[in-house]
Each structure stands twice: as structure tokens, then as C-alpha cells.
Image (cartoon, grey):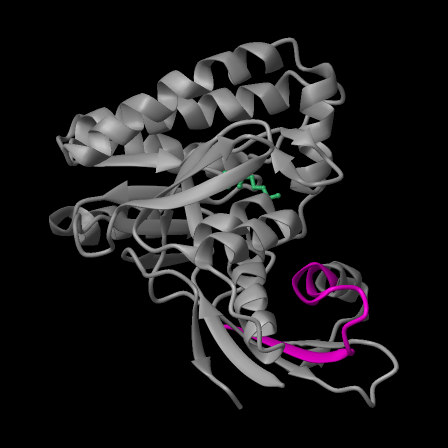
Amino acid sequence: MRAIARAGPNIALIKYWGKSDSAKNLPAVGSISVTLDDLFTEMRVELDDGLDGDILEVNGERRDELRRRVSACLDNVLGPSRCRARVSSHSNFPIAAGLASSASSFAALVVAAAAAGGQDSSRGDLARLAGRASGSAARSLYGGLVELSLAGDGIVVETLLGEREWPLRIVAAVTDTAAKPVGSSEAMEISRRTSPFYSRWIEEQAADLAVARDAIGARDFPALAAVAEHNCLKMHSLMWTSRPPVVYWNSVTLACLARIRSLQEDGVAVFFTMDAGPQVKAICLPDDEARVREALRTVDGVQAVHACGIGCGAALVGGA
Ligand code: PMV
């Protein structure tokens, strides 16, 4: 009746933006991501039929305002007549800071909840359940470089390259830790309804995915860099051309991009990506990590820099 699971966040290199079915939280496009090591969320789920309602603690504090999403996820994993649960979550990195804590949280939650409920679910089923809570969470069930594809009226997730097959490093520059002005689900809907570029985004995604998949297979860093930066800027262009516009960037975000461009001009193998927030993630090869870290750390306004490698998928870490 009790289990603990751990999952790392993931960063998309080819982005998910837009839903084909909001009720089922189905993405309109496939995506490719990298699961991070070092950063993790640990979820402890204890089922207790003596409880009247679910209890959620995040990093030691009751967070009733976040409980509804957690309860809905537990209903999906364990069924609506499940017993209530005491859920506690610990992350070793700042949550709500644009470092994909919802992906690590829901990936760990489905693994812990299924184990606490004695269910023997496949990794694919758990990924689909996590994806109903947060589209990107489905990818954190898998380690390495991961692709989420659309299949029929659902999703399939798989590892393209295992965590030890290409030692990329990810350096994240935190430019602002304030809560997002608009959440990703709402922002995606605004883009779907109003951006004149939305249909083109959907049309081109298969080609971007194919280029990235091939680049990953060949460990071709420049090819992956080019398509990942293009895909990221295309996603943010959708946001900017929405009505009302959704702009997550700030001036420090732009300063980080300029710094990465000058590193590239100096011959450093590095590229950037950004998600629904103002943080900049730089992907590089291990030999260049120290230089990239230092370059981003010294951008005026950068509050913190976190560096990590590629990690494994969500897993149980204990039953108590
Ligand atoms: O999983 P969500 O609903 O938080 O959406 C994530 C969307 C992006 O992070 C912007 C892109 C992605 O593929 O992770």
C-alpha cells in the first residue's frame, strides 16, 4: 500500500506544443526529449482507506491548491473507487522554475501509485497515464534520448538512444523564478485557436522529428543543433503570434541566447532550447561544459546555473 518512485525531468529538443484532444490531454504532435540525471523528484504514495481525502505535501509543506491534479492522476492510475492517498513529493531542484518539475513529478507519481496499488502496469501504460496529467511527463518514464509518437488515438514512447550512448551535457540558466504568467496547457490552446502559423507548425513537425531522429542515430551534433534551435524558435514564434501573445522570454533570456551565439562563433559545439518559461537550456558536449557554464553564469541577471547529464527513466526506489 506504499511505494516510492523517482523520476528526472526532461527537456524537449523537438517540442510538443498543441493538443489534439484537451479532455484526454493528447498532444497534436510528436516530440523528442532528453531525460536528465542529477535532478529528480521523489514521490511517496501511501494508500490509506481511513482517509477522507487525498493529502499532498510538496517538499514538506501541505499544498492543497495542487492536489486536484494529483488526485485526478491517482484516479486514472487506480480507478475512481480507489482509497485515498497520502502523497509526498521531494525535488532536489527548484520546482516551478521552468526546469520541467511537472514532468518528473507526474512520472514518479504514476510509478509510485501503481506500485502502491499492487498494479503490474507496463512502462508504456504508465507513460500514457503520466501523459494524461502532463504531456511531457510521458517522456520521463524513459531514459536517454526519447521520442513520443502519436499512434492511433494515443501515444507511444520509446528510447532512441540509451543514457550512456551519447554523453551530452545540459546546462540550464535560470533567468527568473517567478510563476509563469500563463500555464502551458492554456497557452497551447491560445496558440491553436489564434496563431496564423499553427497549421504550418503541425505540418512541419514530422520533418523536424525525422531530421532529429537521424541526427541522434548518427550522433551528429551540428545536425541536431540546427533542427532543435529551429524547432524551439518556431514554437516560440507560435506563442508570439497568438492573440493575446504569449511571451515567456525576458531580457536575460535574450542575453543568454546572444552568449550562446558567440560561443558558437568561437567554435564551441553548443545549442540552445527553451520551454514554456524564460530559462535557457544549453546542450553541449562534455569537453565544452565548463566553458558553457562559465559563459552563462556570467551573463548579467542569471540567477543560477544547473548542469546535468542524461538520466534513466522513472523507477521505484522503495516500498516504504
Ligand atoms: O507537459 P506540459 O503540459 O507542461 O507541456 C510542455 C510543453 C513544452 O515544455 C513547452 C514542450 C515540451 O515538449 O516539453
Q: Residue extending furthest right?
A: 52
Vertical placement of residue 272 versus 37, above or below: above
Q: Where is 41 relative to 286, above or below?
A: below
- Direction from residue 292 to residue 24 in the image, left or right: right
83 drawn magenta: yes
Residue ID at (60%, 35%): 248
Please identify the quadrant where the N terminus is shown.
bottom right
Q: Is residue 279 left or right of residue 159?
A: right
| 238 and 15: which is toward the camera | 15
- The total of numbered circles placed on residues is 0
Q: Please provide percent x and percent y for residue 214.
A: 23, 27
Task: Tell which residue pokes out farthest to the front in this image.
Answer: 120
Rendered location of residue 133, percent (x, y)? 65, 52
Q: Residue at x 58, y 56 (%)?
A: 102
On the picture, is 83 further left or further right than 183?
right
Please indicate whether residue 298 sits to the left or right of residue 239 in the image. Answer: left
Residue 99 appears in the figure: no
Front one among 46 and 7: 46
| Occupied quadrant, residue 86 | bottom right
Please state the horizontal and vertical placement of residue 5, each as a whole percent of the image: 49, 74
Which sits in the foreground, 239 or 107?
107
Residue at image position (15%, 51%) is 286
The magenta region covers 73-92
| Vertical order, 102 against 181 (above or below) | below
Question: Relative to residue 8, is residue 138 depicted above or below?
Answer: above
- The image quadrant of residue 305 is bottom left
Image coords of residue 207 (percent x, y): 37, 16
* Residue at 45% in and 20% down: 205
Identify the image quadrant of residue 79: bottom right
The quarter of the rendering in which ligand 1 is drawn is: top right
Can residue 316 be seen at all in this image of the molecule? Answer: yes
